[in-house]
């Protein structure tokens, strides 16, 4: 898995890997879930993941543990099980929104970081 990002000012076809899991692996910070429906709490879910990409430079320099923490992110999924609305936020910015028929408890989406 590689997170792709385009350097500032680069043309659309000039994507390059900002993170490579072989040289700076991802780490989990936190994961929380909450039922947040207004009337019936179980009808809306909020799931939050906090993770980071380790510092390539710190790892190359022999660092370990918290010395290797790098760029950190937060992804939040807000999902109404009754209406089918799904909102995904990354670092507080919307990366996905969809409305559809209520689902069977499965949801999947992708985006470029």
Image (cartoon, rainbow, N blue to C red):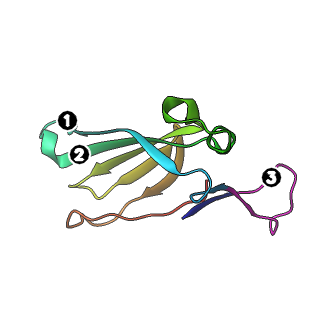
Q: Which residue is rendered at x = 68% and y = 39% of the image?
A: 61
Question: What are the residue bounds of the magenta stretch?
Answer: 5-18
Residue that label 1 marks: 38
**Relative image position of residue 48 (x, y in whole percent):** 36, 41
Question: Do the residues bearing badges 3 and 2 touch, measured as CB atoms within 8 Å?
Answer: no
Identify residue for label 3. 7
Q: Residue at x 81, y 69 (%)?
A: 13
> What crowding class fits label 1: few (fewer than 14 Cα within 10 Å), some (14-19), or many (20 or more)?
few
Of callouts 3 and 1, the N-terminal one: 3
Q: Tell me residue 53's x, y (percent).
A: 56, 45
Mark 3 → mark 2, Cα distance in angstroms: 37 Å
Residue 82: x and y in percent read 20, 55
- In this view, the residue in front, 24 or 8, is 24
The tally of labels here is: 3
Residue depicted at x 31% and y 50%? 79
* Residue occupied by mark 2: 44
Asked if the residue under mark 2 is in contact with the one under mark 1, i.e. CB atoms within 8 Å, the reply is yes
Main SS, magenta region, reads loop
């Amino acid at each position: 898995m590689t997170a792709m990002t385009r350097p500032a000012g680069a043309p659309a076809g000039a994507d390059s890997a900002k993170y490579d899991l072989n040289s700076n692996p991802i780490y989990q910070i936190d994961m929380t879930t909450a039922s947040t429906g207004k009337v019936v709490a179980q009808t809306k879910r909020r799931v939050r993941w906090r993770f980071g990409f380790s510092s390539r430079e710190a790892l190359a320099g022999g660092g370990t543990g918290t010395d290797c923490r790098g760029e950190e992110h937060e992804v939040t999924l807000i999902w109404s099980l009754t209406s089918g609305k799904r909102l995904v936020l990354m670092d507080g910015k919307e990366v996905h929104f969809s409305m559809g028929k209520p689902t069977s408890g499965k949801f999947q989406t992708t985006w470029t970081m």
